[in-house]
Amino acid sequence: MKQIICFGDSNTYGYIPGTGKRYPWGVRWTSLLSQKLGNEEYRVVEEGLVGRTTIFEDPLRDGRCGVKSFPLILETHAPSESDVVVIMLGTNDCKTAYNASPELVGKGTERLIKQIKAYTDRTNILLVSPIHLGEKVWQSEYDPEFSTDSVSVSKRLAEEYRKVSQSENVFFLDASEFAQPSETDQEHMNEEGHRNFAEAVYSKIKSICA
């Protein structure tokens, strides 16, 4: 059985836009991926956490720094050569509090990749650049932890992640080609976005594991 570890933030967790609740099984993309791949051949491990970053400590919430929790998750699930580790982080790194450039966020993903390689050099890695932030996300009725600069940074992440994937010799996927932030909160995927993104990840993983 092949194992697919999905390490991400609220869009991997399945956060329902504007509600604070979670999409149920059969709606969030990780569960749709599991259904598409088939439970007899693949096991999808959902490791999404609201607010997770690549390298930054959230001043308001504990345990959000990806590089601190990732080694524990890798040891827990012990990826092997037949497995795939999917990393989709970066949206929260765009928050004003971190003042991070696209290049710095890219270096954060590079650290995560190196953590996998330090654990094992015999597993497949898929680096996913996240969906873009909506143009109005910074407004008071949405999420003022972001700014207009945050929107700009989010749109430049794909370019940096592609560079990282090439330098680290890992697979790459741009989520913004398949899904957009919902109009409800300008930040999270709606049900259609989860369906479209699940299909994209499914196709990529089938190609990787072929």
Image: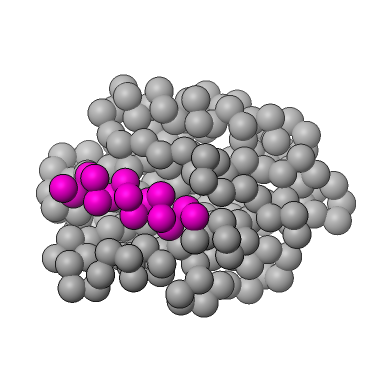
Rendering coords of residue 108 (x, y %): 45, 35
Q: Main secondary structure of the magenta part?
A: helix
Q: Residue furthest right?
A: 140
Nearest the eye: 65 or 121: 121
Vertical side of 89 occupied by 64: above or below: below
Nearest the eye: 30 or 6: 30
Q: Is residue 5 left or right of residue 188?
A: left
Rendering coords of residue 162 (x, y %): 41, 27
Q: Residue at x 26, y 28 (%)?
A: 169
Nearest the eye: 196 or 146: 196
Q: Residue at x 19, y 54 (%)?
A: 83
Q: Residue at x 71, y 70 (%)?
A: 19
Residue 189 visible at all: yes
Q: Is residue 26 left or right of residue 85?
A: right
Residue 77 visible at all: no
- The quarter of the picture where residue 1 lies is bottom left
Residue 87 lies in magenta, yes or no?
no
Rendering coords of residue 20 (x, y %): 67, 70
Q: Residue at x 49, y 55 (%)?
A: 196
Residue 197 lies in magenta, yes or no?
yes
Question: Magenta segment, which residues?
Answer: 196-210
Image colouring: one colour
Vertical side of 23 occupied by 153: above or below: above
- The quarter of the picture where residue 72 lies is bottom left
Q: Is residue 8 left or right of residue 166?
A: right
Rendering coords of residue 139 (x, y %): 85, 47
- The quarter of the picture where residue 120 lies is top left
Q: Is residue 186 left or right of residue 157?
A: right
